[in-house]
Amino acid sequence: MEWLHLGPPPSTVYLVHGEPEGSDALRDRIDRELGWTAVVPRSGERVLIC
């Protein structure tokens, strides 16, 4: 969680590595502790990052 504070808060955090259970747990923790939007994309899902 500490590395998330290296810059200004992002509009969305995309969690794209790790096992599904771990990714879901981290997503929930980011939401709960930081109040940020965190997303675990589905396999094969494309996300446009601008």
Image: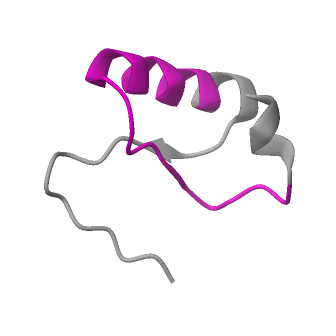
Residue 46 in the image: state x and y as whole percent. 23, 67
Give the colour scheme shown. Answer: one colour
Q: Position of residue 7 (x, y in %)?
A: 85, 58
Residue 1 drawn in magenta: no
Residue drawn at x 55%, y 56% is 12
Question: In the rendered image, which quarter is residue 3 located in?
Answer: top right
In percent of the image, x 84 and y 44: which residue is there? 5
As drawn, which residue projects farthest toward the bottom? 50
Residue 35 in the image: state x and y as whole percent.
Answer: 68, 36
Comparing 17 with 47, the one in front is 17
The question of residue 16 being in magenta is answered with: yes
The N terminus, quarter of image? top right
Q: Is residue 19 above or below residue 36?
A: above
To which quarter of the image does residue 16 belong? top left
Above or below residue 36? Residue 32 is above
Choose between 34 and 40: the one closer to the eye.
40
- Tell me if residue 12 comes above or below residue 37 in the rendering: below
Q: Tell me: 13 left or right of 48.
A: right
Left or right: where 40 falls relative to 2: left
The mark total stands at 0
Judged from this view, the residue extending furthest toward the front is: 18
Is 44 located above or below residue 27 in the figure?
Answer: below
- Residue drawn 62% across and 61% down? 11
Q: Which residues are magenta?
A: 7-30
